[in-house]
Amino acid sequence: MRRVVRVFWGPRPEPVETLAGRWKRTLDGITGLLPGAASPGEGTGTWRQVRGSGPETELPADEGALLGALRVAQAAEDWSDLTGTALRLERADEPGRRTEISGLAGGAPEFLLQSFVVTLHAPDGVEVPEAELLAVLAREWEPDFGDVSDDDVLDALEDDAGYSVGDPVVGRFGYLSPARAALVPEGLGTAREELPGGGVLLSLADPGAGADVVAAYERLRDAGALEPLPRPMDRPVL
């Protein structure tokens, strides 16, 4: 089963050293929540950097190595100061389980959202700490909104609620920045957790309950909590 944990925000220029620190803390959080990785050298449990061209290479999850990888990525892209600096990692864990990560951050684009996405591949029935992973991303990247979704949820939102890629969205779980959180209707979802900085983490539906996700998405959209950032964008959050 493929599950996606994602956060998005608008323009927020940051030096590469700040990005490296955010990446390091995020990887630490993910590793703490997804146990079962084997020791380095066994072919599993080790983060590997994925590039558009060329072989994958091992990338230690320490701030110095991450800083070096981000500097190389930044130097290779003439427009990284505008679009953001991109980095992609993968890790194989227990048999049948794989974690993929992609981040685009530190830029000031007027139309392209910055993002951090964790894609989890695991056998059906395997429990994954989805809400906790979303909370890690929300704490470390201070996003505008975020969600936990799978292919069925995203299909339901597109087919039944008119969701378009790039719009603010929630899934089984959702994160909303403070201004969005202030517009959440009373009684929505089964749980609400306040996070540092004033954002909220919402528990909205159980696995397989696509209709409940659609209903929650529509209530939030109608309340104005999922209003897109104005284009051209001039701030990271609503």
Image: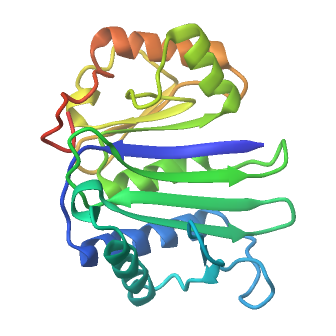
Say which residue appears at 49% left-offset and 21% top-offset. 189
Q: Nearer the viewer, residue 163 or 85?
A: 85
User: For the N terminus, which image quadrant?
Assistant: top right
Q: Is 1 placed above or below 204 here?
A: below
Residue 106 visible at all: yes
Image position, residue 138 (x, y; %): 38, 50
Question: Horizontally, is 152 left or right of 66 in the view?
Answer: right
Query: Splitting the image into 4 quarters, where does residue 193 fall?
Result: top left
Q: Is 194 placed above or below 47 here?
A: above
Image position, residue 231 (x, y; %): 19, 30
Residue 186 visible at all: no
Question: Horizontally, is 236 left or right of 65 in the view?
Answer: left
Q: Is 17 placed above or below 50 here?
A: below
Image position, residue 53 (x, y; %): 59, 70
Say which residue appears at 62% left-offset and 76% top-offset. 54
Q: Is 15 placed above or below 173 here?
A: below
Image position, residue 68 (x, y; %): 39, 86
Query: Splitting the image into 4 quarters, where does residue 227 fall?
Result: top left
User: For the C terminus, which image quadrant?
Assistant: top left
Say which residue appears at 39% left-offset and 81% top-offset. 72
Say which residue appears at 52% left-offset and 34% top-offset. 173
Q: Nearer the viewer, residue 229 or 212?
A: 229
